[in-house]
Image: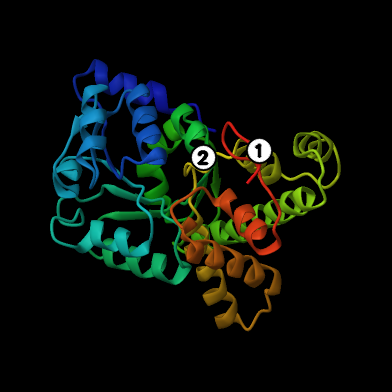
Amino acid sequence: MSTQTAPLAAQGAAQGTALRAAVIGLGSMGFGMAQSLRRAGFDVAGTDVNPDAVARFAAEGGRGAASPAEAAADASVVVCVVVNAAQTEAVLFGPGGVAAAMPEGAVFVSSATMDPAVARRLAAGLEATGRHYLDAPISGGAARAAKGELTVMASGTQAAFAAARAALDAMAATVHELGDAAGIGASFKMINQLLAGVHIAAAGEAVALAAKLGLDLDKVYEVITGSAGNSWMFENRVPHILAGDYRPLSAIEIFVKDLGIVQDMVRAERFPAPIAAAALQMYLASAGLGFGRDDDSSVARTYAQLSGARLPQPGGPAE
């Protein structure tokens, strides 16, 4: 991580010219990223389709904006933290979009997970207007976003990196500079999402099987997290299952989308990906059962319904 961010922002603030940033999307990730930018000395405008999120951001010291274009006016960096490629394209080029509102030479930092081909197309469209595009998907979760400790998988021109550097340093503990063109960062993120989706599905399968076998699930968690079968996703998601708490930190529908993108990519490459395909089917089944907006650990509930396994209920006996 570069150490330039705080000095740059502090120097600008001292001169009455604080670096201006916009954050489009104040959800669990975007809100923390916006606050990290503020801590680093940026003057941050935030907007979201949910007016309550904008009001909360303003109440905590940020500037609320009614539209992406309003947020992006005079911003040197526009950070877009929406759900998918379609929303990113609408933020850029739709009514009230930022492409025309951003100053020339400003950089658009695109953090949504998307098909690399779409990232390349969006970058070409924005760069033709004299603005920069940085393909910069993120990993780390809401807690690390709030601390400014994300991992960013970024690619773009050197000019795009230079324009985004101070903001990246404010939001991330690690910035991987992966190439000089948009699409490379998106490709790395899809490899990450393939693994993450498979690992969550595998964790759900294992815990549901343990429940079917009548094992003590708390003891299963203790044993596996100290054994070779552990994964970051097992360690992170299984406590949700043990608590019977499926409030969405990352929803089932996210992996319906992301593993669907993986399947599109591997089909184009004529590459077999049967394990990712099987995991996608479990997320689709979970969404079909009504769990789409619930936490992605709900895949364990799908295994339980298929098998008759009984999983913990919040504050009560197993279901």
Residue 298, percent from left and from top: 57, 51
* Viewer-nearest of discs 1 and 2: 1
Q: Quadrant of residue 78?
A: top left
Question: Which mark, by number, is residue 242?
Answer: 1
Residue 299, percent from left and from top: 60, 56
The residue type indicated by label 2 comes to Gly
Q: Nearer the viewer, residue 302 or 96?
A: 302
Cα separation between marks 1 and 2: 20 Å
The residue pinned by badge 2 equals 141
**Residue found at x 35% / y 28%:** 35
Kindly tell me whether residue 130 is visible in this rendering.
Answer: no
Q: Is residue 185 above or below residue 247?
A: below
Q: Is residue 31 above or below residue 189?
A: above
The residue type indicated by label 1 comes to Leu
> On the picture, is 79 further left or further right than 219?
left
> Given contact means CB atoms under 8 Å apart, are the residues at marks 1 and 2 in contact?
no
> On the picture, is 52 further left or further right than 235?
left
Q: How many marks?
A: 2
**Residue found at x 31% / y 48%:** 107
